[in-house]
């Protein structure tokens, strides 16, 4: 017996110490690697903070029922099934030669099942990239004739070969080698690396039962994660997993206990329905999803309750004289929707608690004027105001408009951005501190060191999804607990708004100003470029302007930038040599950007080739054509934003969504939605279904808590129930159960509640 070895595993044991428990051949170096991977996944600061709890929170992405593996004779076209197979022959062949980066191979395995129940099937996948040749060689050596493996996926009948074929997309996740009975030695895994040498004594947990399949965790493949999680459960102290939800809540919703749920979500018991597991509706899933939603809504509700009890530095008076002053500067009649949201905002501003309101309105619905009205109301109360925009282009545009609007009032409006010279910045800082600037419009520069207001009463944040919650808090901290108005043009489906923005009140502008002509949206392929060119020529000839937008995908930013630049040169020199064509992208210097934007606003530049920097807010009413290249790479909400750059005047506008190479069915369906509807909410719902909330809102950057397992679309009903329960307990302020829940949620670093008193 080794004295230092603890007897059973608890949830707070550090992953780095896991090697003490001799789990699945995990030595101290591998424990460290596992800790690193988990720390990254759980947003921990370093590997020492990764715990067994984080490992158990690393949930399977799907399950395979290997208790009765299918046989080849059971296959049918389109069937999803896992098969246990034996290699007959495996080899790779080159399908595209070229320089190393563009080389492409197909790797093909012919295999039969142990009972030889049908013809040999073919399992295949693509191998590409600089190391393709080595990878093919590696697979050929591993998958020698006689090797047993399990594979999973959608089988398709191939008439030419008269057999079933299965294409793998991630062979490392979708194909698992099994120990061969005749070889008897350690099975070799697809990644030869030490992380993935599996433990032969554990072979039984991979076959003849239901197994979880995990996404690769750092260097560890699904099979290894399965072994490790299995090993941890085997030695877990039976008392280790506490119940976190109140007893009576569990009863009301017939939820199973946490310990049972965690175990069963990793290893489905033999008697439950696999269909429920696939749909995330097993008792284990229901419990874990409920819990996930419960904590997020509870935390947000707690934050909101705290805010409602705060008082702001000054309450505002918005009476007849103030309203008259506002009416005097309005350049047009407000829409009914604008009037309605203005009323809601005024109500907040008059209250003693600080406003924290989200203003949603589709692109072009006229949010800016509403913000300006609120700002003017605050200034009339002798308070300063700030308006923060995500880009310099947008901040300049707002400053221009608001200066024009307030030209005949005594108020001083200034623009504060990062590209100002240090001396100018300092001058503005001094004036802000002295209370001489009434409306300060800017970028992130507004929340940088050195910026302080004498009496900031209202902070407006435009295009919220580009900003983090952090910045919201920082801006707030610069005032006397000021009113905060957040504006967004990404319509947020209600389900999402009530959770992620659970601490904000929501106002919606659901009507466009009069006189807009609908935009015609066209989905076009490569073969329609000539038509697109003619459309551009025609529109430019009649005095209008055109945007051509390229996506910038992070991984290959350099390549994409080259694409945009090359395309710009081609349009400028070859296609439209007589027209002025401009280029705009994020890597340009601020002064260059400003000059290009100025020339476009002034109508000198006719065609503006750009990356997505123009996505939000830019308002050039004379532009009538938006061309989006590689449209299939954009999210729907992003396309909707881009489309919103045109159709801002009375004339007819066009949005052309160009798809590169082959249109996939999915891309075609998605782009079809754009052609069918111009309703931002419908589009956002679709986007949420397709890409999930993280992508839609950029929550990853913004620091909003993410759900571990809950899916806002699939689990809407559970969300409603969980939210109702969270409110129930929040309302019982003095109950000891609520006190316990509050103590627990404060400990969870995901919610950043610890610092809040
Ligand atoms: P967004 O909500 O996308 O920020 P903007 O505030 O930029 O929209 O408004 C879009 C355009 O509509 C602007 O040119 C603005 O002047 C105009 N606009 C806003 N409200 C009205 C209205 N009530 N009547 C007429 N035009 C309006
Ligand atoms: Mg706007």
Image (cartoon, grey):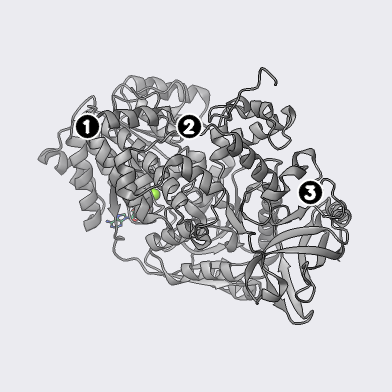
Q: Position of residue 206 (x, y in %)?
A: 68, 51
- What residue is drawn where x is 50% and y is 71%? 672
- Where is mark 3, residue-wise? 189
- Which residue occupies the foreground of this view, 13 or 751? 13
56 to the left or right of 486? right
Q: CA distance from mark 1 to mark 3?
A: 61 Å
Q: Position of residue 10 (x, y in %)?
A: 54, 29
Q: Select label 1 or label 3 by which is in front.
A: 3
- Where is mark 2, residue-wise? 239
Q: Is ligand 2 less than 8 Å from the beta carbon at label 3?
A: no
- Which residue occupies the foreground of this view, 691 or 23? 23
The quarter of the rendered structure image containing the C terminus is top left
Residue 405: in sight, yes or no?
A: no
- Where is mark 1, residue-wise? 353
Tell me which label, 2 or 1, sits earlier in the chain. 2
Tell me which label, 3 or 2, sits earlier in the chain. 3
- Which residue occupies the foreground of this view, 738 or 430? 738
Which type of secondary structure does the marked residue at label 1 adopt?
Answer: loop
19 to the left or right of 258? right
Tell me which label, 1 or 3, sits earlier in the chain. 3
Q: CA distance from mark 3 to mark 2?
A: 35 Å
- Which residue occupies the foreground of this view, 754 or 494? 754
Q: Residue furthest front?
A: 1
């Amino acid at each position: 017996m080794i004295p230092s070895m603890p007897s059973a595993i608890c949830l707070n044991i550090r992953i780095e110490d896991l090697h003490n428990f001799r789990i699945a051949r995990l030595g101290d170096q591998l424990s460290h690697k596992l800790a690193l991977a988990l720390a990254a996944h759980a947003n921990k600061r370093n590997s020492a903070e990764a715990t067994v709890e984080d490992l158990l929170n690393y949930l399977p992405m799907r399950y395979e029922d290997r208790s009765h593996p299918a046989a080849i004779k059971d296959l049918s076209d389109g069937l999803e099934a896992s098969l246990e197979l034996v290699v007959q022959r495996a080899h790779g062949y080159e399908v595209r030669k070229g320089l190393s980066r563009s080389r492409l191979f197909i790797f093909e395995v012919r295999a039969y099942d142990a009972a030889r129940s049908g013809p040999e099937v073919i399992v295949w996948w693509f191998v590409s990239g600089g190391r393709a040749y080595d990878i093919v060689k590696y697979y050929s050596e591993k998958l020698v004739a006689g090797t047993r493996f399990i594979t999973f996926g959608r089988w398709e009948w191939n008439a030419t070969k008269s057999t079933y074929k299965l294409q793998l997309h991630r062979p490392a996740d979708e194909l698992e080698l099994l120990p061969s009975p005749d070889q008897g030695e350690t099975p070799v895994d697809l990644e030869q690396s030490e992380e993935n040498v599996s433990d032969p004594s554990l072979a039984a947990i991979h076959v003849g039962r239901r197994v979880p399949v995990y996404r690769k965790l750092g260097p560890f493949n699904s099979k290894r994660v399965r072994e490790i999680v299995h090993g941890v459960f085997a030695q877990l102290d039976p008392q280790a997993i506490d119940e976190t939800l109140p007893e009576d809540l569990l009863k009301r919703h017939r939820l199973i206990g946490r310990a049972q749920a965690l175990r069963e979500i990793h290893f489905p018991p033999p008697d439950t329905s696999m269909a429920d597991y696939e749909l995330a509706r097993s008792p284990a899933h229901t419990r874990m999803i409920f819990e996930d939603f419960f904590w997020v809504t509870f935390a947000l509700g707690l934050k909101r309750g705290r805010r409602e009890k705060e008082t702001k530095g000054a309450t505002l008076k918005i009476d007849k004289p103030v309203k008259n002053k506002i009416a005097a500067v309005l350049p047009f009649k407000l829409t009914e929707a604008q009037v309605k949201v203005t009323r809601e905002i005024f109500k907040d501003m008059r209250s003693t608690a600080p406003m924290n309101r989200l203003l949603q309105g589709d692109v072009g619905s006229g949010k800016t004027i509403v913000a300006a009205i609120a700002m003017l109301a605050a200034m009339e109360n002798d308070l300063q105001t700030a308006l923060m925009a995500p880009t310099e282009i947008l901040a300049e545009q707002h400053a221009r408009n608001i200066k024009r609007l307030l030209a005949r009032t005594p108020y001083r409006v200034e623009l504060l951005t990062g590209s100002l010279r240090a001396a100018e910045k300092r001058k503005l800082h001094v004036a802000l501190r002295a209370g001489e600037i009434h409306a300060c419009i800017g970028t992130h520069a507004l929340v940088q060191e050195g910026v302080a207001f004498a009496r900031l009463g209202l902070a407006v944040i435009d295009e919220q999804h580009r900003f983090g919650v952090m910045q919201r808090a920082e801006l707030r901290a610069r005032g006397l607990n000021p009113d905060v108005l957040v504006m967004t043009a990404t319509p947020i489906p209600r389900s999402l708004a009530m959770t992620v923005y659970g601490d904000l009140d929501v106002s919606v502008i659901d009507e466009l100003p009069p006189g807009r002509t609908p935009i015609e949206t066209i989905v076009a392929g490569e073969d329609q470029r000539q038509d697109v060119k003619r459309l551009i020529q025609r529109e430019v000839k009649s005095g209008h302007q055109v945007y051509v937008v390229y996506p910038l995908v992070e991984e290959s930013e350099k390549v994409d930038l080259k694409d945009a630049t090359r395309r710009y040169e081609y349009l400028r020199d070859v296609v439209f040599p007589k027209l002025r064509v401009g280029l705009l992208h994020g890597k340009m210097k601020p002064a260059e950007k400003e000059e290009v934007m100025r020339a476009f606003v002034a109508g000198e530049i006719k065609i503006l080739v750009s990356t997505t920097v123009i996505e939000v807010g830019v308002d050039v009413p004379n532009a009538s054509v938006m061309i989006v290249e590689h449209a299939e790479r954009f999210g729907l909400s992003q396309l909707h934003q881009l489309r919103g750059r045109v159709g801002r005047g009375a004339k007819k506008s066009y949005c052309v969504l160009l798809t590169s190479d082959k249109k996939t069915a999915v891309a075609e369906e998605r782009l079809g939605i754009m052609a069918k509807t111009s309703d931002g909410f419908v589009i956002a719902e679709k986007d949420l279904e397709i890409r999930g909330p993280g992508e839609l809102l950029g929550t990853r950057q913004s620091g909003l808590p993410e759900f571990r397992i809950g899916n806002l679309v699939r689990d809407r009903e559970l969300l409603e129930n969980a939210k109702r329960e969270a409110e129930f307990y929040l309302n019982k302020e003095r109950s000891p159960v609520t006190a316990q829940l509050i103590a627990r949620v404060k400990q969870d670093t995901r919610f950043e509640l610890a610092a809040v008193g």
